[in-house]
Amino acid sequence: MSAMTAIMLGWDPDHREGWQFAYASAADTIRHDSVVSIRWPVSFPFVAAGADVWILLQGAHERGLLGHGTVAPSSLGTADRSADDGGSLTVDLDLLLPRGEHITESVLLDRVPGVGWDADPPSGTSLAPGDELLLRTVWAEHAPSSAFDPVTSIPGTLPTSALTRIAVNRHERDPDALRQCIAHHGTSCAVCRFNFEESYGEVGRGFIQVHHIVPGLRVDANYVLDPLTDLVPLCPNCHAMAHRRTPEPYSPAELRRLIRPSIHLEGSVVDPVELRAQEDAARILGS
């Protein structure tokens, strides 16, 4: 039996007991840590680690597509079996749509007709490749992007096999902390002073990435982030260079010292009067 590459799991907001995750807590963890791991009871084996997981909202009054995740590597490619729960899967949820803004069942019926949405697909239903492609298209139209890091792919819009996942400092993704940092420091890079609005006009207004300058090795359970002193705005180039050194990134001061001085010479256009004056000066000095 081949492993499934994309499955759907049902979540019923009307049932609070048992295994079902609490939406608010899960959404808050994703907001800060990019992912939340959920142990999901299942009755099917052979789900590959890294497989896409689509979360179906199956309440009495709310029905549709709510979220996306992937099967965690800890699942080891199969449903974990135990005598007590009959089987479970670890799912890394990476995006939940805001409650009330899910992709409705009527939209899914119209755009992805190959799936029996109105028949309440059971948890573990696999998606055919063609249906998955259609679902990704609909998802990309509804999933929110990040105002602070729009160059990062929205979870679920690309196959997991096309992505390389990296660990991201949670403080560099916290929207509230980023807003405070930018309000205090502005939107020019703290290293090279590049400003997107000055270079690109309106399309660059307000865009800058934010870097957490406190090394991860120095952060413990008692650490409290100060967005004004612990975060600095960096352009994507300088931000990437900061993380070229691990585990302790380069500081903004170190990066400023590393930037090579300009190798070009400032020039200017010489008008005819100045040119004749230079020629006369050269003739006099030559004589």
Image (cartoon, rainbow, N blue to C red):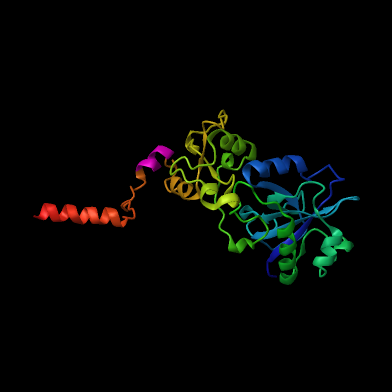
Q: Residue at x 52, y 33 (%)?
A: 230
Nearer to the camera, 136 or 284: 284
The picture quadrant where one finds residue 165 is bottom right
Q: Residue at x 27, y 53 (%)?
A: 274
Say above or below: 84 vs 6: above
Image position, residue 94 (x, y; %):
67, 50
Query: Looking at the rendering, in which quadrant would you find the C terminus?
Result: bottom left
Lateral position of residue 6 relative to residue 102, left or right:
left
Query: Looking at the rendering, in which quadrant would you find the N terminus?
Result: bottom right
Please tell me whether residue 252 belongs to the stretch shown in magenta: yes
Image position, residue 81 (x, y; %):
71, 54
Q: Is residue 104 visible?
A: yes
Say above or below: 1 vs 25: below
Nearer to the camera, 26 or 146: 146
The picture quadrant where one finds residue 28 is top right
Outermost residue toward the left in this view: 287
Image position, residue 91 (x, y; %):
69, 52
Which residues lie in the magenta part?
251-257
Please tell me whether residue 168 belongs to the stretch shown in magenta: no
Lateral position of residue 219 relative to residue 116, left or right:
left
Secondary structure mostly seen in the magenta stretch: helix
